[in-house]
Amino acid sequence: MPKSGPKQARVEPIRDAEDINLPVTGWHVIDETDPDNEIVVSEHETEVEALKAAEEYEQREE
């Protein structure tokens, strides 16, 4: 079924393990438009890059 409405993306930190006390090693941009089918759309070294990519992803038309 096609997605309806605007895209939604979020940014999440990447760590080497599930321990939140470990340092962040990168950032994922995740498409959460369909909560039942979230997809990692990109990976970035800095949070600033990831936030910009998430914003651009939400603006893109497909």
Image (spheres, grey):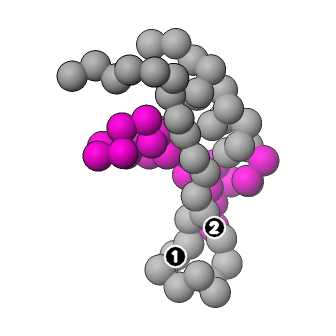
Q: Which residue is mark 1?
A: 16
Element at badge 1? loop
Residue at the extreme front: 5
Distance from Cα at disc 1 to Cα at disc 2: 7 Å
Q: Which mark is residue 26?
A: none
Q: Which residue is mark 2?
A: 25
Residue drawn at the location 67% of the way across and 32% of the way down? 55
Element at badge 2? strand
Which amino acid, by three-letter code, is at mark 1?
Answer: Asp
Q: Is residue 58 magenta?
A: no
Answer few, some or many: residues within 10 Å of disc 1's Cα (few below 14, many 20 plus, some between 14 and 19).
few
Please tell me whether residue 48 is drawn above or below residue 34 in the rendered image: below
Please tell me whether residue 34 is drawn above or below residue 19 in the rendered image: above
x%, y% of residue 39?
Answer: 39, 43
Residue drawn at the location 61% of the way across and 51% of the way down? 11
Residue drawn at the location 29% of the way across and 46% of the way down? 36
Give the magenta part as a residue range.
25-48
Asked whether disc 1 touches disc 2, contact meaning CB atoms under 8 Å apart, the reply is yes
x%, y% of residue 31?
Answer: 46, 39
Nearest the viewer among 44 and 7 is: 7
Which amino acid, by three-letter code, is at mark 2?
Answer: Thr
Residue 42 visible in the picture: no
